[in-house]
Image (cartoon, rainbow, N blue to C red):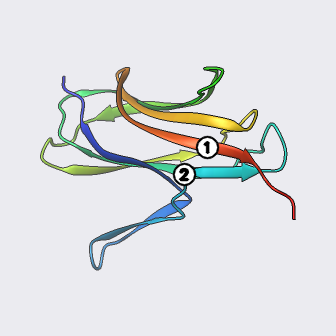
Amino acid sequence: MKPPRVVGLVLCKSFNIDPAVGELNLLGVFHSLAFATWPTPPRPFIAFAALHGGQGDGTIELVAMNLETEELIYRHQRWYTVPDPDLVVHLEIKVRRCRFPAPGRYGFSLRFNGEELAYHPLDVRRLRGD
């Protein structure tokens, strides 16, 4: 068994594929979020990664952790089988129930059988009033 390589881990509002021209579009890419209330309400988004190579199957998971307190705030896992090591696979994880307990820095980690493949920091801040 060999984990796939990740070309990148991106957080965005949505993505679409245009099969007519063979294009993938990531929409609303972000590196920070702002909220007015704490803990925050769930704000759906997508974690997207392009995977390449690897061999075998196992658990792929996305976890989010408060980097200050090391509290796990979100986990999504599912079974993943590498379809063909020569293909690039577009992995979409719909994050629907992630709530942030307080402003701060959070880390999203994509793992395959417990091994970290990619990491994405996210700053969550207080929404400033006008």
Q: What residue sits right under mark 2 in the picture?
A: 31
Question: Would residue 105 be visible to someone looking at this image?
Answer: yes
Residue reaching furthest to the bottom: 20
Give the image location of residue 48, x and y in percent: 42, 50
Viewer-closest of 51 and 105: 105
Viewer-closest of 24 and 59: 24
For the residues labelled 2 and 1, say whether their Cβ atoms are less than 8 Å apart: yes
Q: What residue sits right under mark 1 in the picture?
A: 123
Q: Which corner quadrant holds the C terminus? A: bottom right
Viewer-closest of 106 and 99: 106
Question: Mark 1 packing: few (<14 Cα in 10 Å), some, or many (20+)?
Answer: some
Give the image location of residue 22, x and y in percent: 27, 72
Question: Would residue 44 be visible to someone looking at this image?
Answer: no
- Secondary structure at badge 2 equals loop
Amino acid at the residue labelled 1: Asp
Give the image location of residue 44, x and y in percent: 64, 51
Q: What's the residue at 56%, 59% (across, down)?
A: 13
